[in-house]
Image (spheres, rainbow, N blue to C red):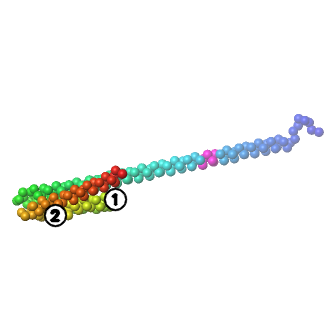
Amino acid sequence: MQSSSSVPTWVPIVVAILGILGIIAGQVVNSWKEERRWKRELAREDVRWQREQERHSEQHRHDKQQKNRELQMQIYADLVATMTKIETNLVANISVPDGHRHEVELLHSENQQLNNESAQLLAKIQMISTEEIADAATSFQESLIARSHQIFHKSRDESGLEEAERLIDEIFRPYNHAQKQFFDAVKAEFLD
């Protein structure tokens, strides 16, 4: 018979095995928890990275849009300045006294350069603008350019001076209207 203080041999073996299994189970559970934590952290990092990329992309898109708007406004301003110079030349041409052919030729030459410049600006506007602005810019440019050559040539002969003055009055009504339509179209696009 065995004494009451003695433990069967299989009990310490089972306890040892259970202890080892407990340690292994604990390691497995800890490893599983660590892997889940690592995956959550990685997912959070991916979301953070994706948000950062979206912010960067949005900032880049905004900067590009801002740069394009500034470019558009510069081109619009250049067209208005060029058209104002053409308008000034037309009026100045009428007021050049007889016998100052050289001044007239200078004005005419400058006017041709301004006409070319306005045509180049108009081409840029048609490429980068909405159809409404492009149409308004075309009307604006054509309203003055179409008759500017007539004014320069008519103002050089005696009977043509009165005709040139009449043409200027005739041109400025639609020109001012076209200019207003152009300004309204630009304001509508940029203030919306």
In which quadrant will I find the N terminus?
A: top right
Q: Which of 62 and 179 lies nearest the eye of the viewer?
A: 179
Q: Which of 31 and 51 lies nearest the eye of the viewer?
A: 51
Q: Which of 155 and 162 lies nearest the eye of the viewer?
A: 162
Residue ID at (53%, 49%)? 47
Q: Which of 52 and 139 lies nearest the eye of the viewer?
A: 139
Q: Is residue 149 left or right of residue 35?
A: left
Residue ID at (60%, 49%)? 39
Number of on-image labels: 2
The percent position of residue 77, horizontal first and vertical second, equals 26, 53
Q: Is residue 174 left or right of residue 161?
A: right
The percent position of residue 56, horizontal first and vertical second, equals 44, 50
Residue ID at (29%, 54%)? 184
Q: Is residue 100 magenta?
A: no
Q: Which residue is mark 2?
A: 149
Q: Is residue 188 visible?
A: yes
Residue ID at (34%, 59%)? 130
Q: Is residue 36 magenta?
A: yes
10 Å crowding of disc 1: few (<14), some (14-19), many (20+): some
Q: Is residue 53 left or right of residue 162?
A: right
Which element carries disc 1, helix, strand or loop? Answer: loop
Which element carries disc 2, helix, strand or loop? Answer: helix
Going by the numbered disc 1, the residue's amino acid type is: Thr
Q: Which residue is mark 1?
A: 130
Q: Is residue 106 visible?
A: no
For marks 1 and 2, give the CA distance. Answer: 30 Å
The percent position of residue 69, horizontal first and vertical second, equals 34, 53
Range drawn in magenta: 34-39
Q: Is residue 192 left or right of residue 115?
A: right
